[in-house]
Image (cartoon, rainbow, N blue to C red):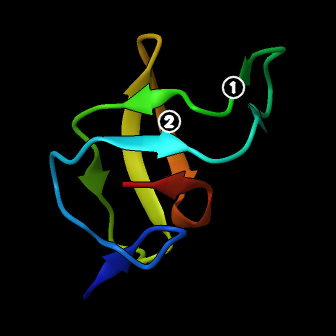
Amino acid sequence: MEVKDANGNILNDGDTVKLTKDLKLKGTSTTIKRGTTVKNIRLTDSADEIDCRINKMSIVLRTEFVKK
């Protein structure tokens, strides 16, 4: 299964990505700003989602909102 970012680049475990859009986290008042760097991503069973840690929170992000 190939996981691709918003630009079509292939993502792998351990890659570093940047957010392309401000994202509001559900259930919290936190907003993750565009341009935030996310290190050491992990791929999930879904080709549309990646797992990562931002500010000591484990978050699942959609691949359409990140770029390599």
The residue sitting at 50% across, 72% down in the picture is: 7
Q: Tag 1's secondary structure?
A: loop
The residue sitting at 79% across, 18% down in the picture is: 28
Q: Residues within 10 Å of mark 1 (few under 14, many from 20)?
A: some
Give amino acid for label 1: Lys
Residue 1, image x and y in percent? 25, 88
Residue 27, image x and y in percent? 80, 26
Give amino acid for label 2: Ile
Vertical arrangement, residue 57 with respect to residue 20, above or below: above
Residue 33 is labelled as 1
For residue 68, side relative to residue 40 (left or right): right
Quadrant assignment, res 10: bottom left
The residue sitting at 21% across, 48% down in the picture is: 15
For residue 31, side relative to residue 6 (left or right): right
Residue 17, image x and y in percent? 38, 44
For residue 20, side relative to residue 47 (left or right): right
Residue, disc 2: 59
Of marks 2 and 1, which one's residue comes earlier in the chain? 1
Instruction: Give me the C-alpha separation between circle 2 and circle 1.
Output: 14 Å
For residue 13, side relative to residue 62 (left or right): left
Q: Quadrant of the C terminus?
A: bottom left
